[in-house]
Image: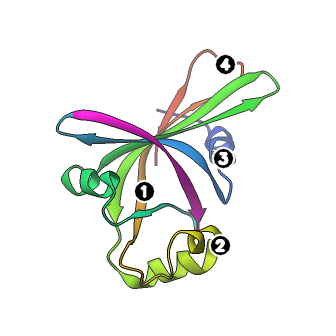
Amino acid sequence: MDVPNDVKKEAWSHFKDHQYVMLATAEGGHPRVRPVTLINYDHKFWVATGTNSAKVREMQGNPNIEFCLQFQGEAGGGYVRVAGLGDVVTDQGPKEKLFAHTDFLADHWEGADDPGYALIQIIPVEVEYMRPGDMDAQRFGV
């Protein structure tokens, strides 16, 4: 997994403030994939969701997750796939900070103390990056 730093930087450059990704969790040994809005804030990845969502239950039972961001470049499609851990945040501080930063959360919850609002921090462990036009993905640890 000896990937040059410029390639790593390029892979991370595809992440914006927030965007749709496909998130995979596990339930009873079976993968569960769904679209979510990934929030890139304070050099960390977050997903806001409902307290009673299947994502929360599944991550509490098995924190291993992956998400995949697909994108288009001049040479065709590419992707960044991130494997890591999903941590359901219980500390009110990060929940308040993210709620204040992310305007669209107010469309779903009354505030950071809304009992229906759950926050998940995604802790990356490994990245797989496929440049548009390439045929082989590059992997590197985080």
Asked whether residue 131 appears in the rendered view, the answer is no
How far from the left and from the top, in percent, is residue 133?
72, 19
| Marks 4/3: CA–CA distance | 17 Å
Task: Name the residue beneath numbered marker 3.
Answer: 9
Q: Which element type, helix, strand or loop, lies under badge 4? A: loop
- 34, above or below 79, in the image: below
Whether tag 1 and tag 2 are in contact, CB under 8 A, the answer is no
Q: Main secondary structure of the magenta part?
A: strand
Task: Name the residue at 34% across, 52% down.
Answer: 55
| Marks 2/4: CA–CA distance | 36 Å
Q: Write down the region rendered in magenta.
A: 30-42
Residue in the foreground of this view, choosing between 105 and 123? 105
Task: Name the residue beneath numbered marker 1.
Answer: 122
Closer to the eye: label 1 or 3 = 1
Task: Name the residue at 69% across, 48% down.
Answer: 13
How far from the left and from the top, in percent, is residue 85?
34, 52
How far from the left and from the top, in percent, is residue 31?
30, 34
| Marks 4/1: CA–CA distance | 27 Å
Whether tag 1 and tag 3 are in contact, CB under 8 A, the answer is no
Task: Name the residue beneath numbered marker 2.
Answer: 103
The amino acid type of the residue labelled 2 equals Asp
Determine crowd level at label 2: few under 14, some 14-19, many 20+ residues with C-alpha closer than 10 A.
few
